[in-house]
């Protein structure tokens, strides 16, 4: 992770007790869950389990606490790992895909970031941008597609898949497409434009 994200986790994160996923291993395997998926859940829990971070600016705040649970099989999507309970009642849940991508799932699966590191990087960048931006503008629906990203470049550390961050001369733009794609709801498309940033504001470590 970037120094910015590491600092965010250290200062803003709270660790609570992790679950012992492996104590469920035999029972889950007997119920048809591949042993490799149980081990994958245990690996996720070892790194991320019990980490509570401040709410995300979209997706109703994201998982309350990052935590693995019993792997779930979805048609045509292989096995997904629950990544933590929602903060509020939602039409989807937060999952880790078979390739390690962090995303959301309901009847289908939509990856948001290449991995959980990318999700945490996005949270850290949002917290940093909110602190230093002179103005914050929310853009929704069709207006998001009209944003002029000329002169902007992707922010690589967030490892965006469906979601993405863009860095310009004095602004950062976060584009949240996940809900719109998963729910086939273009009205859910949203972007946050953080303007008036200096060099520190654009990077922050």
Image (cartoon, rainbow, N blue to C red):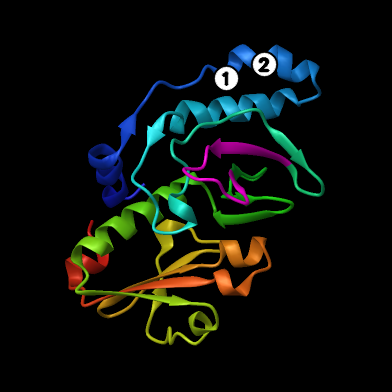
Q: Residues within 10 Å of mark 1 (few under 14, many from 20)?
A: many
Q: Position of residue 34 (x, y in %)?
A: 76, 26
What kind of element bears circle 1? helix
- Which stretch appears magenta? 79-94
Please determine whether, in this image, residue 106 is positioned above or below residue 34. below
Q: Nearer the viewer, residue 51 or 93?
A: 93
Residue 58 vs residue 29: left or right?
A: left
Q: Quadrant of the C terminus?
A: bottom left
Residue 179 vs residue 33: left or right?
A: left
What kind of element bears circle 2? helix
Q: Mark 2 = which residue? A: 25
Residue 95 vs residue 156: left or right?
A: right
Q: Residues within 10 Å of mark 2 (few under 14, many from 20)?
A: some
Q: Nearer the viewer, residue 201 or 13?
A: 13
Residue drawn 34% across the image and 28% down it: 15
Q: Position of residue 138 (x, y in %)?
A: 38, 74
CB atoms of marks 1 and 2 within 8 Å:
yes
Classify residue 51 by image quadrant.
top left
Q: Position of residue 168 (x, y in %)?
A: 32, 78
Determine the residue located farthest toward the front in the rendered image: 89
Q: Which mark is residue 21?
A: 1
The question of residue 83 being in magenta is answered with yes
Residue 48 vs residue 200: left or right?
A: right
Q: Nearer the viewer, residue 103 or 91?
A: 91
Classify residue 179 by image quadrant.
bottom right
CA–CA distance in space, label 1 to label 2: 7 Å
Residue drawn 55% across the image and 67% down it: 177
Q: Position of residue 156 (x, y in %)?
A: 42, 62
Q: Nearer the viewer, residue 53 or 77?
A: 53
């Amino acid at each position: 992770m970037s120094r910015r994200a590491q600092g965010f986790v250290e200062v803003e994160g709270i660790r609570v007790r992790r679950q012992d996923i492996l104590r469920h291993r035999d029972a889950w395997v007997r119920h048809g869950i591949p042993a490799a998926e149980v081990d994958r859940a245990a690996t996720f829990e070892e790194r991320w389990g019990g980490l509570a971070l401040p709410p995300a600016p979209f997706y109703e705040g994201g998982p309350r606490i990052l935590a693995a649970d019993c792997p779930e099989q979805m048609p045509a999507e292989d096995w997904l790992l629950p990544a933590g309970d929602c903060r509020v009642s939602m039409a989807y849940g937060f999952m880790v895909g078979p390739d390690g991508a962090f995303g959301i799932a309901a009847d289908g699966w939509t990856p948001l970031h290449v991995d959980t590191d990318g999700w945490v990087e996005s949270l850290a960048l949002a917290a940093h941008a909110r602190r230093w931006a002179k103005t914050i503008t929310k853009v929704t629906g069709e207006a998001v597609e009209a944003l002029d990203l000329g002169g902007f470049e992707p922010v690589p550390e967030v490892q965006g898949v469906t979601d993405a961050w863009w860095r310009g001369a004095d602004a950062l733009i976060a584009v949240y497409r996940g809900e719109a794609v998963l729910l086939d709801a273009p009205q859910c498309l949203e972007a946050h434009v953080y303007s008036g940033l200096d060099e520190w504001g654009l990077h922050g470590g």
